[in-house]
């Protein structure tokens, strides 16, 4: 999808074929401070944790990070500090994108041209994410992102429930 091209952080290209940049600490503890680190490692063929395969453990950690960030963003927007809010929003948007893909059991794949094909996603996902990414330092983008997070959290809970039901039926 052309409208997302060039927006995402350079960390997406973190490894650029250099497996030596992967550090052992990424195995020892789940790192949310580097957006898309596990997705990038997967795309580069680096043997690394795959949080999308254990979303029941990874996504609650994403949500913890989001709730902390959400409070910080609310303060920044209340103080009309759009510059700082914009930077925090980019981090929050990355968390949402990870949550979106990981809920669906797949790594984030760039470019983001397949959001509409995901099974568990909020309505009008591409338009909404495009709006947020086009103006991350606007209060309306923050409110839209907060709504997307609530909707995706519900979809995640539904996905977990359906997986549990399927598992119980098989047994």
Image: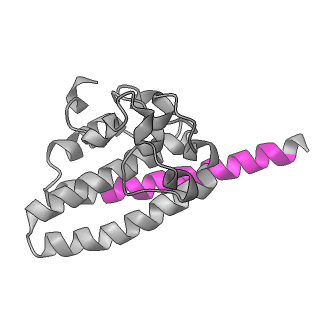
Note whether 90 is above or below 121 in the view shown. below
Taking the image as shown, residue 169 lies to the left or right of residue 114, namely right
Residue 16 locus on image (x, y percent) = 34, 29
Taking the image as shown, residue 29 lies to the left or right of residue 88, namely right
Count of numbered circles on the image: 0
Q: Is residue 84 visible?
A: yes
Taking the image as shown, residue 48 lies to the left or right of residue 121, namely right
Q: Is residue 121 visible?
A: no
Tell me the quadrant of the picture where the N terminus can be found.
Answer: top left
Q: Residue furthest front?
A: 20
User: Foreground: 100 or 26?
Assistant: 26
Residue 129 locus on image (x, y percent) = 29, 42
Image point (63%, 48%), residue name: 54
Q: Which residues are magenta?
A: 145-168
Tell me the quadrant of the picture where the C terminus can be found.
Answer: top right
Image point (58%, 39%), residue name: 105
Say if the magenta span includes residue 148.
Answer: yes
For the stretch drawn in magenta, the main secondary structure is: helix
Image point (88%, 40%), residue name: 170
Q: How is the image coloured?
A: one colour
């Amino acid at each position: 999808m052309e409208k997302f091209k060039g927006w995402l952080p350079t960390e997406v290209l973190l490894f650029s074929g250099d497996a030596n940049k992967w550090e052992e600490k990424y195995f020892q503890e789940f790192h949310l401070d580097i957006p898309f680190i596990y997705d990038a490692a997967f795309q580069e063929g680096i043997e690394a944790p795959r949080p999308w395969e254990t979303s029941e453990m990874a996504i609650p950690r994403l949500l913890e990070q989001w709730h902390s960030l959400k409070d910080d963003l609310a303060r920044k927007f209340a103080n009309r500090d759009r510059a700082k809010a914009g930077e925090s929003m980019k981090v929050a948007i990355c968390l949402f994108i990870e949550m979106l893909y990981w809920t669906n059991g797949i790594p984030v794949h760039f470019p983001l041209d397949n959001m509409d094909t995901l099974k568990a996603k909020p309505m009008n996902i591409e338009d909404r994410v495009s709006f947020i990414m086009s103006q991350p330092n606007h209060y309306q983008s923050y409110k839209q992102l907060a709504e997307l997070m609530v909707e995706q959290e519900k979809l995640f809970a539904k996905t977990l429930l359906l997986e549990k039901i399927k598992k119980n039926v098989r047994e």
